[in-house]
Amino acid sequence: MSDSTPRQRADETLSILTACHAVLTDDHFVYISGQHGSGWIDKDAIFIEPARIDRLARLLAAAVRHVEAEILCGPATGGLIVAQWTAFALQLPAVYAEHDAQAAAGGLRGDFLLRRKYDSLVAGRRVLVVDDVVNSGHSVRQTVRAVRRANGEVRAAAALIHRGNIDAAGLEVDEYLYLLECDIPEWPAADCPLCRRGVAVNTRYAHGQDFLDARHASR
């Protein structure tokens, strides 16, 4: 797969997502950043079949091999899975970042941190930050910052699916790579047209229940 083109990788990725009905549209979702949007990629539909994530990780490995990373790091939980499978394809180690127990201002969960002595594993090494789906870029950006606080050298960020709402500069990296772009707009909660129209928040996917719980607690 190392000689495949970006278009071939994108086409195969879309085929895999379509086959497992992972692309959800025309609904009301809340993302981890607190932003709202009308679409969601159901990552669980991908992850339940190891053959699917194995294939997608091999496609991503082909796209990022030139980065010459020494270790991969992904935000839990989806990015953790993608980082491990992609690292396996590249024959590299992988670690992951996880949420601080304290919720961050403006977000639904705490910032991503490196625990379990993973900070010592990324220190002084070339790191590729990997996620499954980049919505607002919140998880990747927080992971990039966590790696840098641990004195790791972030070479690039990569994802299976790019939602079209952020670029490399917004992720605070020099290079941003992905297999497939699914353009799904998003809005701040205060400006959400779906909220204004009274469209119910989806609580099965994304972070809709967190959003409703936080709104209820603030009353």
Image: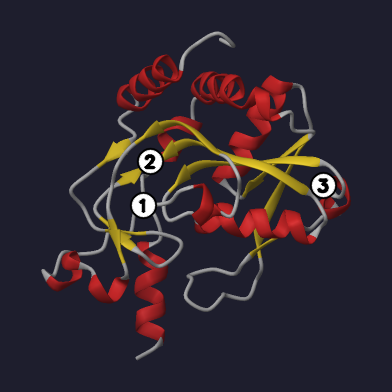
Pointer 3 local density, CA inside 10 Å: few below 14, some 14–19, many at least 20: many
Q: Residues within 10 Å of mark 1 (few under 14, many from 20)?
A: some
Calculate the distance from the C-alpha at mark 3 to the C-alpha at mark 1: 32 Å
Give the quarter of the figure containing the N terminus: top right
Q: Residues within 10 Å of mark 2 (few under 14, many from 20)?
A: some
Query: Residue 17 vs residue 101: left or right?
Result: left
Labels 3 and 2: the sequence-earlier one: 2
Camera-near label (3 vs 1) is: 3
User: Residue at label 1?
Assistant: 205
Amino acid carrying label 1: it is Tyr
Residue 167, percent from left and from top: 46, 48
Quarter of the view holding residue 142? bottom right
Q: Position of residue 145 (x, y in %)?
A: 67, 59
Q: Position of residue 169 (x, y in %)?
A: 52, 53
Mark number displayed over residue 42? 2
Q: For mark 3, what is the residue?
A: 122
